[in-house]
Image (cartoon, rainbow, N blue to C red):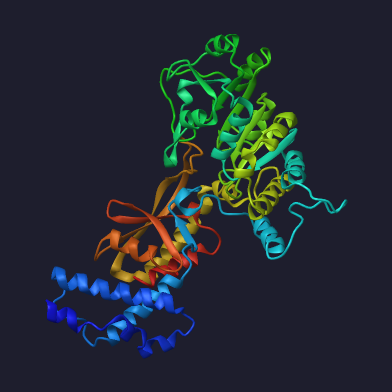
């Protein structure tokens, strides 16, 4: 073993190998780390018995490996992915794709300077929150709007500013949710300094439960949308309009964490939306920008101007404020909704609205092309499936869809999935019963061609 290990070249020898002439732009520290990594990998293989001799043709082979490793390390970590999973707002894949208007806004302004915090009329310092808030509020038809870097931050800020000195906040036991990443509503309420008062039972909460807590001195009602689970069977909840009327009669506030961010109700996407929540009397509605609104990651607080002003002035706002890229994309997304109240220019909404007939045509086309490309290497057909909004927007909504099913005749569907996933662009699909399912609902324009190209690697 010692003799084998001594045969391996030193790092400085690999660093001077002519193979690096093919990539003169690679920094020396990156080359050095690649050489060390490749040599350590071979040492481990020798020690474990996985190989019984250094690679044939070394050090040329080792230098070539190091060059490939350094090039791979030089590539961007974030890269385009074709979403063939059928999950519209796939959290692992970045949730909502941005509208063309949002991309244009970023390209137009982000490459240079902008009036992010400058009042162009007076020439004095302005606020990123105030001049954009007015534009957002016009679209939403409310008093004012504030933007944070995500909805969890919006929830924390609202509770901190309005109940952070120990004010009692009423919440139904059926709404003490936990979302992805172990974010729990009770934990965020405790961290904000609010005093949480649970009412009702897990499955049933009545108006009288809230009224007793309000009569006992609670000053805030927190309503939370069950975005990732559903209660069925013997259940009862209080409509928002009734809850708001009871709270306002006792000078209490209603904060509604809607989460999903659907601006207006749409068939297939549910009927709980931001504009209805504001109309039903919520003082503040909190929701995500990168879910069914179809914009960038953001937390949006919409509602009463005086309450939004309190949040804006709170010290925590500085910690959770968004950057210019977020605000540029969000403004353009809201303007797209303003131009088309149904949200058709927004990709997430457009994908959700695709008809089964249109999906069938696209699936037949893709399946035919794959049969021609793969020949007898796989069985290919079109099957009926269900897509889902995903992204913590709804636990029950399902969208009928069509998928191309590819069942390899040699090898496993897992190996095929890995090949597609590791390519450029990466293609991510569902695996089911020995086959890959390519759901057409989540394919964007041009993705069918990208899928076909990806199968060339197999």
Residue that extends furthest to the bottom in the rendered view of this protein: 18
- What residue lies at 42% left-to-right and 70% top-to-bottom? 73
Q: Where does the image place residue 435, in percent across and percent down from the top left?
A: 31, 56
Q: Residue at x 19, y 71 (%)?
A: 45
Q: Position of residue 177 (x, y in %)?
A: 46, 30
66 with respect to 442 (left or right): left
- Image quarter of the C terminus: bottom left
Task: Say left or right for 330 vs 438.
Answer: right
Q: Quadrant of residue 7?
A: bottom left
Q: Quadrant of the N terminus?
A: bottom left
Q: Position of residue 181 (x, y in %)?
A: 43, 42
Quadrant hosting residue 242: top right
**Relative height, residue 67 to residue 382 (above, below):** below
| Residue 268 visible here | no
Q: Quadrant of residue 168?
A: top right
**Can residue 214 be seen by looking at this rendering?**
yes
Q: Position of residue 324 (x, y in %)?
A: 67, 54
Look at the picture and state if 338 lies above or below 210: below
Frontmost residue, 423 versus 220: 220
Residue furthest right as drawn: 122
Residue sitting nearer the eye, 41 or 325: 41
Q: Is residue 47 left or right of residue 88?
A: left
| Numbered-mark total | 0
């Amino acid at each position: 073993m010692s003799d084998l290990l001594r045969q391996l070249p030193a790092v400085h020898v690999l660093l001077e190998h002519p193979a690096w002439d093919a990539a003169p732009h690679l920094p020396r520290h990156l080359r050095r780390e690649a050489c060390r990594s490749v040599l350590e990998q071979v040492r481990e293989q020798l020690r474990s018995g996985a190989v019984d001799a250094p690679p044939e043709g070394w050090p040329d082979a080792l230098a070539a490996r190091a060059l490939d490793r350094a090039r791979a390390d030089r590539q961007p970590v974030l890269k385009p992915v074709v979403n063939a999973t059928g999950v519209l707002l796939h959290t692992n894949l970045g949730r909502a794709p941005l509208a063309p208007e949002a991309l244009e806004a970023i390209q137009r302004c982000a490459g240079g300077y902008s009036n992010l915090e400058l009042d162009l009329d007076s020439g004095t310092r302005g606020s990123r929150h105030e001049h954009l808030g007015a534009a957002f509020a016009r679209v939403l038809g409310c008093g004012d709007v504030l933007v944070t870097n995500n909805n969890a931050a919006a929830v924390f800020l609202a509770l901190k500013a309005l109940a952070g000195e120990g004010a009692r906040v009423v919440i139904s036991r059926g709404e003490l949710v936990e979302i992805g990443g172990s974010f729990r509503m009770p934990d965020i309420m405790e961290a904000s300094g609010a005093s949480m008062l649970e009412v009702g039972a897990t499955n049933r909460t009545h108006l009288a439960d809230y009224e007793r807590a309000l009569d006992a001195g609670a000053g805030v009602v927190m309503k939370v949308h069950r975005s990732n689970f559903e209660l069925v069977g013997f259940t009862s909840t209080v409509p928002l309009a009734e809850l708001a009327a009871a709270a306002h009669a006792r000078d209490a506030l209603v904060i509604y964490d809607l989460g999903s961010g659907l601006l207006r109700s749409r068939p297939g996407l549910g009927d709980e939306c931001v504009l209805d929540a504001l109309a039903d009397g919520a003082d503040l509605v909190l929701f995500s920008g990168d879910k069914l609104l179809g914009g960038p990651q953001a937390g949006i607080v919409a509602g009463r101007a005086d309450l939004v002003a309190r949040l804006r002035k709170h010290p925590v706002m500085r910690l959770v404020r968004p950057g210019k890229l977020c605000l540029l994309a969000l403004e353009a997304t809201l303007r797209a909704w303003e131009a088309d109240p149904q949200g058709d220019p927004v990709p997430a909404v457009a994908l959700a609205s695709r008809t089964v007939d249109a999906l069938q045509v696209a699936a037949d086309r893709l399946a035919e092309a794959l049969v021609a490309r793969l020949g007898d290497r796989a069985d290919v057909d079109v099957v009926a499936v269900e897509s889902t909004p995903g992204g913590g927007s709804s636990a029950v909504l399902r969208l009928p869809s069509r998928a191309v099913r590819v069942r390899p005749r040699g090898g496993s569907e897992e190996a095929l999935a890995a090949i597609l996933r590791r390519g450029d662009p990466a293609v991510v699909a569902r695996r089911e019963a020995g086959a890959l399912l390519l759901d057409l609902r989540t394919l964007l324009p041009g993705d069918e061609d990208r899928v076909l190209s990806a199968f060339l690697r197999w």
